[in-house]
Image (spheres, rainbow, N blue to C red):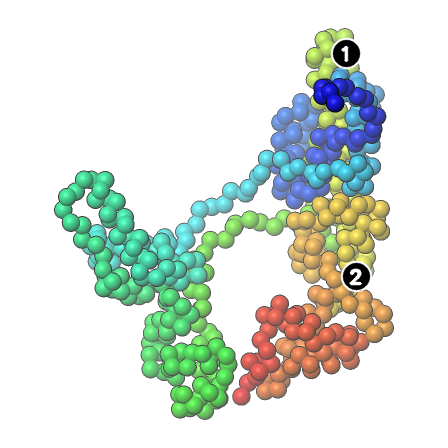
Protein backbone atom coordinates (compact mmCIF):
# COMPACT_ATOMS: atom_id res chain seq x y z
CA UNK A 1 0.00 0.00 0.00
CA UNK A 2 1.45 3.35 -1.02
CA UNK A 3 2.00 5.79 1.82
CA UNK A 4 1.64 9.53 1.55
CA UNK A 5 -0.09 12.63 2.73
CA UNK A 6 -3.65 13.60 1.94
CA UNK A 7 -6.14 16.28 2.90
CA UNK A 8 -9.74 15.83 3.95
CA UNK A 9 -12.51 18.13 5.18
CA UNK A 10 -14.58 17.36 8.25
CA UNK A 11 -17.68 19.24 9.36
CA UNK A 12 -18.24 19.53 13.09
CA UNK A 13 -19.30 21.82 15.90
CA UNK A 14 -16.91 23.07 18.56
CA UNK A 15 -17.55 25.51 21.39
CA UNK A 16 -14.65 27.92 21.69
CA UNK A 17 -14.14 29.86 24.88
CA UNK A 18 -13.82 33.60 24.66
CA UNK A 19 -11.24 34.86 27.20
CA UNK A 20 -13.94 37.10 28.64
CA UNK A 21 -15.91 34.04 29.71
CA UNK A 22 -12.95 32.84 31.69
CA UNK A 23 -12.69 36.29 33.24
CA UNK A 24 -16.39 36.23 34.13
CA UNK A 25 -15.96 32.96 36.02
CA UNK A 26 -12.85 34.30 37.70
CA UNK A 27 -14.83 37.32 38.90
CA UNK A 28 -17.41 35.01 40.46
CA UNK A 29 -14.58 33.15 42.20
CA UNK A 30 -12.81 36.29 43.50
CA UNK A 31 -13.26 37.30 47.14
CA UNK A 32 -14.11 40.95 47.74
CA UNK A 33 -10.53 42.18 48.22
CA UNK A 34 -9.33 40.41 45.07
CA UNK A 35 -12.21 41.86 43.06
CA UNK A 36 -11.40 45.34 44.33
CA UNK A 37 -7.82 45.05 43.09
CA UNK A 38 -8.98 43.55 39.79
CA UNK A 39 -11.33 46.46 39.07
CA UNK A 40 -8.64 49.00 39.91
CA UNK A 41 -6.32 47.27 37.43
CA UNK A 42 -9.01 47.31 34.73
CA UNK A 43 -9.59 51.00 35.40
CA UNK A 44 -5.93 51.70 34.69
CA UNK A 45 -5.79 49.60 31.52
CA UNK A 46 -9.04 50.55 29.76
CA UNK A 47 -9.50 54.24 28.79
CA UNK A 48 -13.23 53.71 28.24
CA UNK A 49 -13.71 53.11 31.98
CA UNK A 50 -13.83 55.91 34.51
CA UNK A 51 -14.37 56.06 38.25
CA UNK A 52 -17.61 57.47 39.62
CA UNK A 53 -16.78 59.99 42.32
CA UNK A 54 -18.52 59.72 45.67
CA UNK A 55 -19.94 63.24 45.54
CA UNK A 56 -21.75 62.60 42.26
CA UNK A 57 -25.48 61.98 42.40
CA UNK A 58 -27.07 58.58 41.84
CA UNK A 59 -23.87 56.65 42.41
CA UNK A 60 -25.54 53.27 42.53
CA UNK A 61 -27.52 53.80 39.32
CA UNK A 62 -24.83 55.55 37.29
CA UNK A 63 -23.25 52.40 35.87
CA UNK A 64 -26.55 51.10 34.50
CA UNK A 65 -27.52 54.53 33.14
CA UNK A 66 -24.24 54.93 31.31
CA UNK A 67 -24.55 51.43 29.92
CA UNK A 68 -28.03 52.22 28.57
CA UNK A 69 -26.76 55.42 26.95
CA UNK A 70 -23.90 53.56 25.33
CA UNK A 71 -26.20 51.31 23.35
CA UNK A 72 -26.23 53.97 20.60
CA UNK A 73 -22.49 53.39 20.18
CA UNK A 74 -22.39 49.94 18.62
CA UNK A 75 -18.91 48.51 18.31
CA UNK A 76 -18.08 47.08 14.96
CA UNK A 77 -17.50 43.32 14.69
CA UNK A 78 -13.96 42.36 15.58
CA UNK A 79 -11.85 41.77 12.53
CA UNK A 80 -10.74 38.25 11.76
CA UNK A 81 -13.00 36.53 14.31
CA UNK A 82 -15.46 33.83 13.24
CA UNK A 83 -19.14 34.54 13.71
CA UNK A 84 -19.49 31.82 16.37
CA UNK A 85 -16.92 33.51 18.62
CA UNK A 86 -18.46 36.95 18.16
CA UNK A 87 -21.81 35.52 19.25
CA UNK A 88 -20.27 34.44 22.55
CA UNK A 89 -20.14 38.10 23.63
CA UNK A 90 -23.90 38.45 23.34
CA UNK A 91 -24.74 35.25 25.19
CA UNK A 92 -21.96 35.10 27.76
CA UNK A 93 -24.46 35.05 30.64
CA UNK A 94 -26.18 31.98 29.24
CA UNK A 95 -22.90 30.13 28.82
CA UNK A 96 -21.68 31.22 32.25
CA UNK A 97 -24.82 30.24 34.11
CA UNK A 98 -25.05 26.75 32.66
CA UNK A 99 -21.50 26.07 33.79
CA UNK A 100 -20.16 25.96 30.21
CA UNK A 101 -20.89 22.25 30.12
CA UNK A 102 -21.76 21.92 26.45
CA UNK A 103 -18.93 20.82 24.21
CA UNK A 104 -16.80 19.62 27.12
CA UNK A 105 -15.59 23.06 28.12
CA UNK A 106 -12.34 22.89 30.12
CA UNK A 107 -12.05 24.25 33.63
CA UNK A 108 -11.33 27.98 33.84
CA UNK A 109 -7.73 29.07 34.07
CA UNK A 110 -6.60 30.88 37.18
CA UNK A 111 -4.16 33.21 35.42
CA UNK A 112 -5.13 36.44 37.12
CA UNK A 113 -2.44 38.35 38.95
CA UNK A 114 -2.38 37.36 42.62
CA UNK A 115 -2.87 40.08 45.19
CA UNK A 116 -1.66 39.45 48.71
CA UNK A 117 -2.32 41.85 51.57
CA UNK A 118 0.84 43.44 52.93
CA UNK A 119 1.20 42.87 56.66
CA UNK A 120 3.34 44.61 59.24
CA UNK A 121 6.51 42.69 60.04
CA UNK A 122 6.31 40.84 63.35
CA UNK A 123 8.92 39.09 65.45
CA UNK A 124 8.69 35.35 65.75
CA UNK A 125 9.89 32.75 68.22
CA UNK A 126 13.41 32.59 66.79
CA UNK A 127 13.82 36.39 67.20
CA UNK A 128 12.59 36.12 70.79
CA UNK A 129 15.14 33.40 71.55
CA UNK A 130 18.01 35.24 69.83
CA UNK A 131 17.31 38.36 71.90
CA UNK A 132 17.73 36.30 75.08
CA UNK A 133 20.85 34.51 73.86
CA UNK A 134 22.42 37.90 73.09
CA UNK A 135 22.11 38.80 76.79
CA UNK A 136 23.88 35.63 77.97
CA UNK A 137 27.59 35.52 78.74
CA UNK A 138 28.52 33.10 75.97
CA UNK A 139 31.63 32.72 73.82
CA UNK A 140 31.42 33.15 70.07
CA UNK A 141 31.77 29.40 69.75
CA UNK A 142 28.82 28.80 72.10
CA UNK A 143 26.73 31.43 70.30
CA UNK A 144 27.26 29.51 67.08
CA UNK A 145 25.99 26.34 68.75
CA UNK A 146 23.05 28.23 70.27
CA UNK A 147 22.10 29.47 66.79
CA UNK A 148 22.08 25.86 65.58
CA UNK A 149 19.69 24.95 68.40
CA UNK A 150 17.38 27.86 67.59
CA UNK A 151 17.25 26.78 63.96
CA UNK A 152 16.01 23.35 65.04
CA UNK A 153 13.19 24.53 67.33
CA UNK A 154 9.81 24.24 65.60
CA UNK A 155 6.87 26.61 65.88
CA UNK A 156 5.41 24.62 68.80
CA UNK A 157 8.62 25.26 70.77
CA UNK A 158 9.95 21.70 70.63
CA UNK A 159 13.44 20.67 69.60
CA UNK A 160 12.78 19.01 66.24
CA UNK A 161 16.18 17.29 65.90
CA UNK A 162 18.19 14.96 68.11
CA UNK A 163 21.39 16.13 69.77
CA UNK A 164 23.38 13.87 67.43
CA UNK A 165 21.79 15.51 64.37
CA UNK A 166 22.53 18.98 65.75
CA UNK A 167 26.16 18.03 66.41
CA UNK A 168 26.51 16.58 62.93
CA UNK A 169 25.10 19.73 61.34
CA UNK A 170 27.20 22.26 63.26
CA UNK A 171 30.41 20.27 62.91
CA UNK A 172 29.91 20.07 59.13
CA UNK A 173 29.65 23.86 59.07
CA UNK A 174 32.96 24.13 60.94
CA UNK A 175 34.71 21.71 58.61
CA UNK A 176 33.45 23.46 55.45
CA UNK A 177 34.56 26.82 56.83
CA UNK A 178 38.03 25.43 57.55
CA UNK A 179 38.32 24.00 54.02
CA UNK A 180 37.30 27.31 52.49
CA UNK A 181 40.05 29.11 54.43
CA UNK A 182 42.65 26.38 53.65
CA UNK A 183 43.48 26.02 57.31
CA UNK A 184 45.83 23.14 58.05
CA UNK A 185 45.34 23.21 61.81
CA UNK A 186 42.87 20.79 63.39
CA UNK A 187 39.39 22.25 63.87
CA UNK A 188 38.00 21.76 67.42
CA UNK A 189 34.61 20.11 66.87
CA UNK A 190 31.65 20.24 69.24
CA UNK A 191 31.19 17.23 71.51
CA UNK A 192 28.16 15.50 73.02
CA UNK A 193 28.95 17.24 76.32
CA UNK A 194 28.83 20.63 74.56
CA UNK A 195 25.44 19.79 73.07
CA UNK A 196 24.02 18.63 76.41
CA UNK A 197 25.30 21.76 78.15
CA UNK A 198 23.77 24.04 75.50
CA UNK A 199 20.46 22.14 75.69
CA UNK A 200 20.32 22.97 79.41
CA UNK A 201 20.96 26.62 78.61
CA UNK A 202 18.27 26.76 75.92
CA UNK A 203 15.71 25.12 78.21
CA UNK A 204 16.11 27.96 80.72
CA UNK A 205 14.92 30.54 78.20
CA UNK A 206 11.45 32.04 77.92
CA UNK A 207 8.81 30.74 77.37
CA UNK A 208 9.00 27.95 79.95
CA UNK A 209 9.09 24.53 78.29
CA UNK A 210 11.04 25.75 75.26
CA UNK A 211 13.46 23.33 73.54
CA UNK A 212 11.79 20.28 75.11
CA UNK A 213 12.11 17.05 73.17
CA UNK A 214 8.68 15.67 74.05
CA UNK A 215 5.53 16.58 75.97
CA UNK A 216 6.73 14.95 79.18
CA UNK A 217 9.91 17.04 79.24
CA UNK A 218 7.96 20.17 78.28
CA UNK A 219 5.59 19.82 81.26
CA UNK A 220 8.48 19.04 83.62
CA UNK A 221 10.35 22.18 82.52
CA UNK A 222 7.27 24.34 83.11
CA UNK A 223 6.78 22.86 86.57
CA UNK A 224 10.42 23.59 87.41
CA UNK A 225 10.07 27.18 86.19
CA UNK A 226 6.97 27.56 88.41
CA UNK A 227 8.87 26.25 91.49
CA UNK A 228 6.63 23.17 91.67
CA UNK A 229 9.49 20.66 91.93
CA UNK A 230 8.65 17.78 94.23
CA UNK A 231 4.90 18.31 94.10
CA UNK A 232 2.40 15.59 93.29
CA UNK A 233 1.88 17.17 89.86
CA UNK A 234 5.58 16.80 89.03
CA UNK A 235 5.65 13.22 90.31
CA UNK A 236 2.62 12.47 88.14
CA UNK A 237 4.55 13.67 85.07
CA UNK A 238 7.86 12.01 85.95
CA UNK A 239 6.68 8.74 87.49
CA UNK A 240 3.24 8.03 85.96
CA UNK A 241 3.15 9.80 82.62
CA UNK A 242 1.55 6.88 80.64
CA UNK A 243 -1.25 6.69 83.22
CA UNK A 244 -1.66 10.48 83.07
CA UNK A 245 -2.12 10.40 79.30
CA UNK A 246 -4.61 7.52 79.54
CA UNK A 247 -6.49 9.13 82.47
CA UNK A 248 -6.02 5.96 84.52
CA UNK A 249 -6.22 7.58 87.93
CA UNK A 250 -6.43 4.40 89.97
CA UNK A 251 -3.22 3.01 88.48
CA UNK A 252 -1.47 6.37 88.82
CA UNK A 253 -2.54 6.56 92.45
CA UNK A 254 -0.99 3.17 93.19
CA UNK A 255 2.34 4.31 91.72
CA UNK A 256 2.33 7.59 93.60
CA UNK A 257 0.90 6.32 96.89
CA UNK A 258 -2.09 8.66 96.87
CA UNK A 259 -5.83 8.47 96.25
CA UNK A 260 -7.28 8.51 92.69
CA UNK A 261 -9.01 11.80 93.49
CA UNK A 262 -5.67 13.38 94.46
CA UNK A 263 -4.08 12.12 91.23
CA UNK A 264 -6.90 13.61 89.19
CA UNK A 265 -6.62 16.92 91.06
CA UNK A 266 -2.90 17.03 90.25
CA UNK A 267 -3.76 16.40 86.60
CA UNK A 268 -6.12 19.38 86.73
CA UNK A 269 -3.16 21.56 87.70
CA UNK A 270 -1.18 20.19 84.74
CA UNK A 271 -4.04 21.09 82.40
CA UNK A 272 -3.27 24.76 83.03
CA UNK A 273 0.22 24.38 81.52
CA UNK A 274 0.92 25.10 77.85
CA UNK A 275 1.66 21.95 75.81
CA UNK A 276 2.86 24.11 72.88
CA UNK A 277 4.78 27.03 74.40
CA UNK A 278 6.13 28.28 71.08
CA UNK A 279 2.68 28.96 69.64
CA UNK A 280 2.44 32.23 71.54
CA UNK A 281 5.15 33.63 69.26
CA UNK A 282 4.12 32.04 65.98
CA UNK A 283 3.29 34.47 63.21
CA UNK A 284 -0.24 34.51 61.86
CA UNK A 285 -1.03 34.96 58.18
CA UNK A 286 -2.20 38.53 58.82
CA UNK A 287 -5.10 38.20 56.39
CA UNK A 288 -8.35 39.97 57.15
CA UNK A 289 -11.83 38.62 56.46
CA UNK A 290 -14.06 41.12 54.68
CA UNK A 291 -17.67 39.91 54.36
CA UNK A 292 -18.99 39.92 50.80
CA UNK A 293 -22.60 39.87 51.97
CA UNK A 294 -24.54 41.27 54.93
CA UNK A 295 -27.64 39.65 56.45
CA UNK A 296 -29.71 41.84 58.78
CA UNK A 297 -32.99 41.24 60.56
CA UNK A 298 -35.30 44.22 60.00
CA UNK A 299 -38.92 44.18 61.18
CA UNK A 300 -38.85 40.42 61.56
CA UNK A 301 -37.49 39.82 58.06
CA UNK A 302 -33.97 38.77 57.13
CA UNK A 303 -32.67 41.03 54.37
CA UNK A 304 -29.55 40.46 52.27
CA UNK A 305 -27.21 43.22 51.07
CA UNK A 306 -23.95 43.18 49.16
CA UNK A 307 -21.01 44.71 51.00
CA UNK A 308 -19.63 46.40 47.89
CA UNK A 309 -19.45 50.03 49.01
CA UNK A 310 -15.63 49.86 48.84
CA UNK A 311 -15.59 48.54 45.28
CA UNK A 312 -14.64 51.05 42.59
CA UNK A 313 -17.81 52.31 40.86
CA UNK A 314 -17.15 52.15 37.14
CA UNK A 315 -18.97 53.67 34.18
CA UNK A 316 -18.25 54.36 30.53
CA UNK A 317 -16.26 57.52 29.91
CA UNK A 318 -18.36 60.21 28.21
CA UNK A 319 -15.37 61.83 26.54
CA UNK A 320 -14.12 58.59 25.03
CA UNK A 321 -17.61 57.69 23.86
CA UNK A 322 -17.74 60.98 21.95
CA UNK A 323 -14.41 60.16 20.34
CA UNK A 324 -15.59 56.66 19.42
CA UNK A 325 -18.68 58.01 17.64
CA UNK A 326 -16.56 59.85 15.05
CA UNK A 327 -15.34 56.74 13.24
CA UNK A 328 -14.11 58.64 10.19
CA UNK A 329 -11.18 60.04 12.15
CA UNK A 330 -9.53 56.65 12.61
CA UNK A 331 -7.88 54.10 10.40
CA UNK A 332 -8.68 50.38 10.59
CA UNK A 333 -6.11 49.61 13.28
CA UNK A 334 -7.35 52.37 15.57
CA UNK A 335 -10.97 51.40 14.97
CA UNK A 336 -10.20 47.85 16.04
CA UNK A 337 -8.56 49.07 19.26
CA UNK A 338 -11.45 51.43 20.08
CA UNK A 339 -14.04 48.76 19.31
CA UNK A 340 -12.34 46.14 21.47
CA UNK A 341 -11.78 48.50 24.41
CA UNK A 342 -15.34 49.82 24.33
CA UNK A 343 -16.75 46.31 24.11
CA UNK A 344 -14.56 45.17 27.01
CA UNK A 345 -15.68 48.13 29.15
CA UNK A 346 -19.36 47.43 28.44
CA UNK A 347 -18.89 43.77 29.20
CA UNK A 348 -17.05 44.43 32.48
CA UNK A 349 -19.86 46.63 33.80
CA UNK A 350 -22.36 43.91 32.91
CA UNK A 351 -20.17 41.25 34.54
CA UNK A 352 -19.97 43.21 37.81
CA UNK A 353 -23.75 43.48 37.98
CA UNK A 354 -24.15 39.80 37.01
CA UNK A 355 -21.81 38.79 39.83
CA UNK A 356 -23.75 40.93 42.28
CA UNK A 357 -27.13 39.50 41.26
CA UNK A 358 -25.83 35.93 41.33
CA UNK A 359 -24.46 36.30 44.86
CA UNK A 360 -27.72 37.86 46.06
CA UNK A 361 -29.76 35.01 44.56
CA UNK A 362 -27.60 32.40 46.26
CA UNK A 363 -27.64 34.15 49.64
CA UNK A 364 -31.39 34.77 49.52
CA UNK A 365 -31.97 31.05 49.03
CA UNK A 366 -29.57 30.18 51.86
CA UNK A 367 -31.30 32.60 54.24
CA UNK A 368 -34.74 31.21 53.35
CA UNK A 369 -33.54 27.61 53.78
CA UNK A 370 -31.58 28.23 56.98
CA UNK A 371 -34.01 30.55 58.76
CA UNK A 372 -34.12 28.18 61.76
CA UNK A 373 -30.37 28.61 62.12
CA UNK A 374 -30.66 32.39 62.34
CA UNK A 375 -33.48 32.02 64.89
CA UNK A 376 -32.28 29.07 67.03
CA UNK A 377 -28.56 28.63 66.39
CA UNK A 378 -26.52 25.73 65.04
CA UNK A 379 -29.08 23.14 66.16
CA UNK A 380 -31.49 24.62 63.62
CA UNK A 381 -29.09 24.24 60.69
CA UNK A 382 -30.55 22.12 57.89
CA UNK A 383 -28.63 19.97 55.41
CA UNK A 384 -27.92 21.74 52.14
CA UNK A 385 -25.95 20.89 49.00
CA UNK A 386 -24.70 22.92 46.07
CA UNK A 387 -26.98 20.93 43.77
CA UNK A 388 -30.08 22.00 45.71
CA UNK A 389 -29.17 25.68 45.41
CA UNK A 390 -28.31 25.29 41.73
CA UNK A 391 -31.64 23.63 40.93
CA UNK A 392 -33.63 26.18 42.93
CA UNK A 393 -32.21 29.31 41.27
CA UNK A 394 -31.62 27.87 37.82
CA UNK A 395 -27.84 27.87 37.73
CA UNK A 396 -25.16 25.28 37.35
CA UNK A 397 -23.61 23.61 40.36
CA UNK A 398 -20.12 24.78 39.36
CA UNK A 399 -21.36 28.38 39.35
CA UNK A 400 -22.69 27.99 42.90
CA UNK A 401 -19.35 26.52 43.93
CA UNK A 402 -17.52 29.57 42.56
CA UNK A 403 -19.94 31.96 44.24
CA UNK A 404 -19.58 30.34 47.68
CA UNK A 405 -15.84 29.69 47.60
CA UNK A 406 -13.87 31.93 49.97
CA UNK A 407 -16.89 34.20 50.46
CA UNK A 408 -18.10 35.38 53.85
CA UNK A 409 -21.38 36.77 55.15
CA UNK A 410 -21.90 39.03 58.12
CA UNK A 411 -24.98 37.69 59.91
CA UNK A 412 -26.70 38.15 63.29
CA UNK A 413 -24.90 34.92 64.25
CA UNK A 414 -21.45 36.28 63.36
CA UNK A 415 -19.24 36.43 60.28
CA UNK A 416 -19.47 33.02 58.61
CA UNK A 417 -18.09 31.50 55.40
CA UNK A 418 -20.82 30.61 52.92
CA UNK A 419 -19.54 27.02 52.97
CA UNK A 420 -20.68 26.88 56.61
CA UNK A 421 -24.30 26.63 55.47
CA UNK A 422 -23.62 23.51 53.38
CA UNK A 423 -23.45 20.10 55.03
CA UNK A 424 -24.85 16.60 54.77
CA UNK A 425 -27.67 15.52 57.04
CA UNK A 426 -30.00 12.85 58.37
CA UNK A 427 -33.74 12.34 58.48
CA UNK A 428 -35.47 12.64 61.85
CA UNK A 429 -38.33 10.39 62.92
CA UNK A 430 -40.90 12.94 61.72
CA UNK A 431 -39.21 13.19 58.31
CA UNK A 432 -37.49 16.52 58.95
CA UNK A 433 -33.95 17.00 57.64
CA UNK A 434 -31.27 17.62 60.26
CA UNK A 435 -27.80 18.94 59.43
CA UNK A 436 -24.71 16.99 60.49
CA UNK A 437 -23.31 20.24 61.88
CA UNK A 438 -26.47 20.62 63.95
CA UNK A 439 -26.10 17.07 65.29
CA UNK A 440 -22.52 17.84 66.33
CA UNK A 441 -23.72 20.92 68.18
CA UNK A 442 -26.32 18.78 69.99
CA UNK A 443 -23.68 16.22 70.99
CA UNK A 444 -21.42 19.00 72.23
CA UNK A 445 -24.22 20.42 74.37
CA UNK A 446 -25.11 17.01 75.80
CA UNK A 447 -21.51 16.45 76.87
CA UNK A 448 -21.26 19.96 78.33
CA UNK A 449 -24.37 19.34 80.48
CA UNK A 450 -23.49 15.80 81.58
CA UNK A 451 -22.78 14.69 85.15
CA UNK A 452 -18.94 14.68 85.32
CA UNK A 453 -19.05 11.70 87.68
CA UNK A 454 -21.22 9.75 85.23
CA UNK A 455 -20.24 10.94 81.74
CA UNK A 456 -22.34 9.94 78.77
CA UNK A 457 -21.11 6.99 76.74
CA UNK A 458 -21.58 6.87 72.98
CA UNK A 459 -24.48 4.46 73.45
CA UNK A 460 -26.12 6.83 75.93
CA UNK A 461 -25.78 9.71 73.45
CA UNK A 462 -27.39 7.54 70.75
CA UNK A 463 -30.39 6.90 73.04
CA UNK A 464 -30.75 10.60 73.91
CA UNK A 465 -30.67 11.55 70.24
CA UNK A 466 -33.27 8.87 69.52
CA UNK A 467 -35.60 10.52 72.04
CA UNK A 468 -35.35 13.69 69.91
CA UNK A 469 -36.28 11.66 66.83
CA UNK A 470 -32.75 11.25 65.48
CA UNK A 471 -31.77 7.72 64.50
CA UNK A 472 -27.98 7.64 64.37
CA UNK A 473 -25.45 4.81 64.67
CA UNK A 474 -23.03 4.61 67.59
CA UNK A 475 -20.03 4.66 65.26
CA UNK A 476 -21.34 7.91 63.76
CA UNK A 477 -21.59 9.43 67.24
CA UNK A 478 -18.01 8.30 67.94
CA UNK A 479 -16.88 9.86 64.66
CA UNK A 480 -18.57 13.19 65.42
CA UNK A 481 -17.20 13.14 68.98
CA UNK A 482 -13.64 12.64 67.70
CA UNK A 483 -14.09 15.48 65.20
CA UNK A 484 -15.20 17.73 68.06
CA UNK A 485 -12.12 16.76 70.12
CA UNK A 486 -14.23 15.21 72.92
CA UNK A 487 -12.60 12.39 74.87
CA UNK A 488 -14.19 9.03 75.54
CA UNK A 489 -16.52 8.74 78.53
CA UNK A 490 -14.00 6.89 80.70
CA UNK A 491 -11.44 9.66 80.13
CA UNK A 492 -13.95 12.40 81.00
CA UNK A 493 -15.02 10.81 84.26
CA UNK A 494 -14.42 12.81 87.43
CA UNK A 495 -13.79 11.04 90.76
Residue 280 visible in the shown view: no
x, y percent for residue 133: 28, 56
Q: Residue at x 83, y 68 (%)?
A: 432
Left or right of residue 401: residue 68: right
- The tag on residue 20 is none
Q: Secondary structure at mark 1?
A: helix
Query: For mark 2, what is the residue?
Result: 371
Farthest left residue? Answer: 185
Q: Around disc 1, counting alpha carbons within 10 Å, would you say few (fewer than 14), some (14 to 19), or many (20 or more)?
A: few
How many tags in the picture? 2
* Quadrant housing the N terminus: top right
x, y percent for residue 45: 63, 25
x, y percent for residue 255: 41, 88
Query: For mark 1, what is the residue?
Result: 327
Q: Residue at x 79, y 61 (%)?
A: 371
Q: Secondary structure at mark 2?
A: helix
What is the distance, in whole Å, between disc 1 and disc 2 at their CAs? 56 Å
- Residue 465: image quadrant is bottom right
Left or right of residue 215: residue 408: right
Q: Residue at x 31, y 61 (%)?
A: 163
On screen, residue 286 above or below 99: below
Residue 7 visible in the shown view: yes
Left or right of residue 229: residue 293: right
> Does label 1 or label 2 sit earlier along the sequence?
1
Q: Residue at x 65, y 44 (%)?
A: 31
x, y percent for residue 433: 81, 66
Farthest front residue? Answer: 1
Amino acid sequence: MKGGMQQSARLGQELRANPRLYQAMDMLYMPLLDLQQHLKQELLQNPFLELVEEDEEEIVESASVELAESQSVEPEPEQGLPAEEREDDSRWEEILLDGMESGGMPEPRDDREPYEPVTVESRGLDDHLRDQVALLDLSERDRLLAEEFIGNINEDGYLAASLDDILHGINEVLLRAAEAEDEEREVPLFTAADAQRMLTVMQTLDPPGIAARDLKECLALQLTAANLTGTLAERLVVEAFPELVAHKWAEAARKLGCTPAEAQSAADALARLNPKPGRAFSEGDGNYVVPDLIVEKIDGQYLVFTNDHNLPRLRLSRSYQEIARDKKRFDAEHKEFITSRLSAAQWLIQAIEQRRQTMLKVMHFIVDRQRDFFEKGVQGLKPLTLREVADAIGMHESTISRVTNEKFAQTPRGVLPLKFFFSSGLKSADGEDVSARGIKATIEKLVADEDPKRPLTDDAIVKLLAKDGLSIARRTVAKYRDELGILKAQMRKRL
